[in-house]
Image: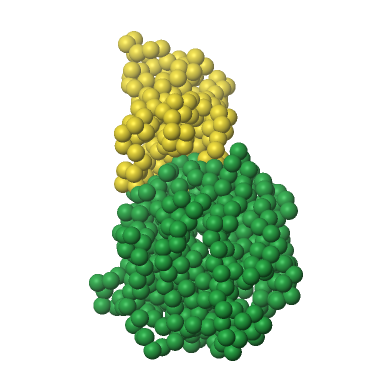
Amino acid sequence: MLLKPDPTFYASAKDAIKAPPETVAYVALLSANGTGTTDAITVVDTKTSSPTYAAQVGRVDLPNTGDELHHFGWNACSSALCPNAPKPHVDRRYLVVPGLRSSRIYIVDTKPTASEPRIVRTIEPQEIIAKTGYSRPHTVHCGPDAIYVSALGNADGEGPGGIFMLDCDTFDVIGPWEADRGPQYFAYDFWWHLGHDVMITSEWGTPNMIEGGLDPNLLLGGKYGHHLHFWNLRSRRHVQAVDLGAEQQLVLEIRPSHDPNQTYGFVGVVISLKDLSSSIWMWHRTNGKYGVTKVIDIPAEPADPAQLPDLLKGFSAVPPLLSDIDLSVDDRYLYASCWGTGELRQYDVSDPFKPQFVGSVRIGGIAKRSAHPSHANQPLNGGPQMVEISRDGRRVYFTNSLYRSWDDQFYPDGIKSWMVKVDVAGDGAMTFDPKFFVEFPHVHRAHQVRLEGGDASSDSYCFS
Amino acid sequence: MDGRYVWIVLFLLGCYHGINPGMGWLFAVALGLQDRSRASVVFALIPIALGHVASVAIVVSLAVFAAAIFPHAIVHQTAAAILIAFGVYRLVRVRHPRWVGMRVGFWGLALWGFLMSSAHGAGLMLLPFVTAAPVSNAMSMPMPHGSAATGFLMIAVHTLGYFLTMLVVALIVYEKLGVRFLRQAWFNVDLVWAIALFAAGIVALFT
């Protein structure tokens, strides 16, 4: 218990953008073959003045195989200052790290030495399944009252997926979150408008629909998720489902405004069956009802079939495969990871209804294989995927692996994993940091990045 | 204890609860910021204070009731034991509240105030005063041991301190300071409170 609030907690997003730069990043590494090697959380030095800048300076290897690390989150964050459920004197020090395939959750302590994380507790899949009915834990958010974790399905790999809670002090599994799920069946990402007691959830597919790879029959049949769900965060009841249309397949990352009094946000759609494009939709509320508007369209790029994996040969095009989006803490810039085309796009969303394309950087890509400026002759595979923005918005980090079985479908030559960083100028212009190019050994692939002290997708606030 | 000091201490205990950001004023500020309205700040404090009164009143009523039935020494010693136990509990097991959201009406806030005060053990600190031996100082207000009227007055004085402090702090923060300073200034008053409960219990045991 602390005597003063954890210094990484900020009452509002406006304050958080003044936070000092992160000195380390935590990165989820998953075993490239799924067996044999174990997954790990690695620590990358992000302090520019450090002699070990952009190098891996620490790591914790998980004791089990087959976890498939994916997303992870903090035990506590700025929402601890929320006045309805204050707990300002807890420490942001534990990473809550789910294995998406194993359904095991590791609690990793990042103190006292940031570069020496250690596992302090393991919640076994049996416990999670027994207490919640859910399996395949995915997104982790530190809520004002508990740690919320989304899960893709049940123990048999079917739906419904949903959300369960962990006690924020003991990490005990509390139970499923929903009191009434209404028509919701698929689950994936979630976040909230804390000032309005609203939860928003998105849809991927059940574990059985995704674990063996993207199923072209399900995809072309429009069977993957295409809804957005709105809930009352307090009563835990489903309030409204919004259908983006069955041709909009895989409704993934949820990025609400960081201002708790706003009621808009963005969600990324991986692929349109009409033209293979990706899109970003904005939700907004009028008179208590939510509507969605498609605000960004990212078209597929023509390509020589010879360069394409079997799945795409017939289309002679590379879909952007928008796999992650991230909104800067000041709600000004939205970043879009086009994992297929190998492009990170930046939009000015000061007017959320009318995003302005600012620019993009290219790296990797199914057809292009663009290089990093520091290794100009080395073609790279994979593409911008999990993207994380520093609290001040000046540094953007990203990695290149999506999900093991899907990686192998789109990059059948085997993803060679890297993590890079772009610097963002005051006017939004992005440039690769030539000194920041982290290559991971073949046995591992990098997924989500979490920045020390918080980042754009880990903290929520109760004050605007 | 001299009767006059009892009332001052009760008032100050109210102030101590009032100044704790987790006990009401910060919630009122947040609701005011949501509505962009100073009136919302003030109106939010009323149900929160009512919830506090209810919480304290339950504890005080039980004590008054017990004092009317059981021998004084037993009631007093029991009250002291409860204080010590609760203080230790608060030190060992910090539980975090999860009762209401950020969109709350009058009764939601009253419930929140009640639960927050109860979890805090706000009423417990009044126990030693309620169960203390009768005061015979001619200068003080009459404090017949365990009378309902005295209990009522105690709650009123305590709540006045609580409400006025919340009101002043909430308005200063809302109008002038903003919530940014919280991350520096939100001292762990709960920890101090737990120690104070424990200490008050020990003192009560020997007085």
- Please tell me which residue is depicted at 28% across the width and 71% down the height of the picture: A48
State which quadrant residue A300 falls in: bottom right
Asked if A140 appears above or below A239 in the picture, the reply is: below
Q: Quadrant of residue A110?
A: bottom left
Looking at the image, is A268 positioned above or below residue A422?
above
Name which residue lies at 67% across and 82% down. Answer: A314
The residue located at (45%, 17%) in the rendering is B153
Can you say which quadrant of the picture contains the C terminus of chain B? top left
**Residue B200 horizontal/vertical position (percent):** 39, 35
Q: Is residue A442 visible?
A: yes
Residue closer to the observer: A119 or A360: A360
State the hue of chain B: yellow
Q: Nearer the viewer, residue A449 or B186?
A: A449
The residue closer to the viewer here, A311 or A45, is: A311
The colour scheme is by chain
* Image quarter hosting the N terminus of chain B: top left
Task: For residue B199, say whether it is visible.
Answer: no
| Chain letter of the green region | A
Q: Is residue A209 above or below residue A194?
A: below
